[in-house]
Every structure is written in structure tokens, then in C-alpha cells.
Image (spheres, helix red, strand yellow):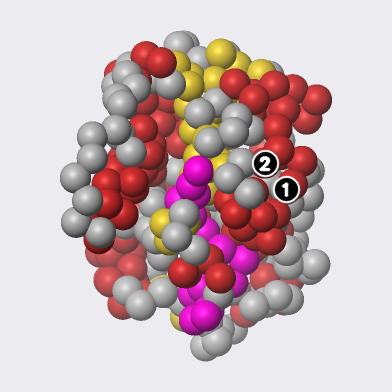
Amino acid sequence: MESVFYHNASRVNEGDFLAILFHCPWDNADQWLAALQAALPNEEFRIWPDLGAVEEIDFAMVWKLPHGILSALPNLAAISSLGAGVDALIEDPDLPRHIPIARLVDPLMTDRMAEYVCATVLHHHLGLDVYDEHQRRQYWQRNPTTDARDRTVALLGLGQMGRRCAQRLGALGFNLAGWSRGSNDVVGVQCSHGRGNLEGVLQAADITVVLLPLTGQTINLMDRVAFNAMRPGSHVINCSRGELVVDADLIAALDAGQLAGATLDAFREEPLPRGHPLWRHPKVRVTPHIASLSAPDTAALILADQVRRARNRQHLADTINIEHGY
Ligand code: GLV
């Protein structure tokens, strides 16, 4: 595999000037750049769209870069996403597929995701959404309690984030089921894999947490069929991408009482447009894609290490399998 790493390196001579392409469309782009410059003080960053001499760029750190830019960099040797997901990169029809592409795997983001999942699972588990509604009506009523050991949480996706969530939820005492594309073995989790086994996992769960990457196999996975397979009165939490959920099917399942509630952190269109039915649905809790925000200070150290690896012709960490799409 070593040979793919500097596929174009023969075109860059020893001592040639090298630069890093940076594109961050977030509000805190300045903070990102400052953290990266501190971690890589001797590097020159080219901030899209000011690319300068394109042949000097050998590394790209990007999020939602317009399509067609990466393929116009003749000496690009590696790409790193500024987030955990790479779906926006893979959507680029001109993506240079022969060079290594890395996800951002930051233990801090993994912890943040686990905190979000534990908080939202506990919210549903304790029926706090019901008490929120009671409070609005000044209505005092104690509902029966269910213990964590009598609840099953299904984790769809058993990557780093899914496994960390499993650890934390297991420590809280929940029964855990897990589902993934390929086979997986996670301590304390009843694991299944493959599309044919999804229904069984959904049927077993009181709360289903979607942590899968967006790929050709997972798009629209949570549709009418999936919601009908879920236990009546169960909850769904989506921390992945909006495209995994068919919104109209979710709303129909909530309105029919098949599902008791949904917590959604990701949407097909972000920001979720004003007036979208999900904003106002009484059984839906909306958060603005904050479950696992990337953190410039820790990410910069990880990205700096990736640059050093690429320059030393070493394997990058956390590269994706382009055929799997993550
Ligand atoms: C956020 O959605 C990410 O992919 O990091």
C-alpha cells in the first residue's frame, strides 16, 4: 500500500516548496487556522479560494470544499477531513480516489458523542420529555419507572463512536444491541450485522441510536419499514446524517403513535429551515448538529501528525475504504 501514498511524489522534487490547502466553512475558521498554525509553525496554509501555485499543494485539510478543486491539484498526496464524516468528500465526482483520505478521529469528539447519546437516551428512558410537557400544563403526575436493566438500547453503527457509546451506556446498566455493516464483536453488546438482521435489532430495542456513516447503503435506511419494525412506543435518536432518515416516514410513525419520540441532531438541510415540520413536532427534539463537534485544539495536533506522516511517506491514520464510503 506504501506506493499509493505519494502517488504523485515523483513530480515533487526534494527541497520543493510544499503547502497545505485549508477550507473550513464554519464560524470558528480563524480558531482552526490559529490552532493549525501553532501545531505546524513551518507550514504555509493556502486558504481556498486563494490557492496560489497549485503544484505546491501536497496536503488538503477540508470540510465541504466545492467539487472539482482537489482534482486540480497535481501533486496532492493526501486529504484529511476536518470532521469525522467523509460523505461530503465522497460526493465530489472528481475526488482523487487513488490517494489516501483520512477521517478525523479525535477521542474528544468520541467522548462528546457518547455524552450526547447518554444524555438523550437517559432523557427518553426517564420520561423527562413527558414531564417537560406536564410542566407546561402545571400537571403533577408520577409515571411508572422502568429500570435501565429492563431497557434495550440499539446502536446502529459500531465504529469508534458506537463502541464508546456502548461502554458508557453499559456502565449505566442498559441492555445493548448493536448492528453494523460487517461483523463486529463488542464486549457487552449483542452484535448483529448485515441488512437482513436489521429488523430483528430494531424489534428488540426500546431506544435506537443511529450512528452510521452516510453511504449508498445507509441512505434512507430509517424509513417506513424500519419504523414499523421498531417496538411500539420506542424512540429514535439520529446523530448521523439527515439523509439516513426519511422525514415524512418518521413524522407518520410519530403521528400514528408507533414511535413515542425522536431526537434529531442531523438534517437533510442544515440549518433546518424555519417552518420545517420537524421544528414544531411535539414528539421531536431538535439539536443543531452539536452531538460531536470537532475541536480545533485537539484536532490540530491530530492533523499535524497526519501531515508529518504524509511527508515521511508513512501510512496516514484512520484512512477510509473508498468502496465502503467511510
Ligand atoms: C460531523 O458531522 C462530523 O462528521 O464530524
Residues 40 and 235: in front is 235
Residue 257 horizontal side relative to residue 6, left or right: left
Neighbor class of circle 1 (other Cα within 10 Å; few <14, some 14-19, many 20+) is some
Ligand 1 within 8 Å of the CB at mark 1: no
Residue 145 appears in the rendering: yes
Q: Which residues are magenta?
A: 260-275
Q: Residue 295: x and y, percent?
A: 32, 57
| Disc 2 + disc 1, Cβ < 8 Å | yes
Residue at 40% from the left image edge and 31% from the top image edge:
165
Q: Is residue 321 magenta?
A: no
Neighbor class of circle 2 (other Cα within 10 Å; few <14, some 14-19, many 20+) is many
Q: Is residue 265 above or below residue 158?
A: below
Q: Amino acid at mark 1?
A: Asp
Q: Quadrant of the N terminus?
A: top right
Q: Is residue 319 above or below residue 94?
A: above
Which of the labelled discs sits on residue 132, or is there none? Answer: none
Which of the labelled discs sits on residue 227, or is there none? Answer: 2
Residue at 51% from the left image edge and 73% from the top image edge:
272
Residue 102 appears in the rendering: no
Residue under pointer 1: 223
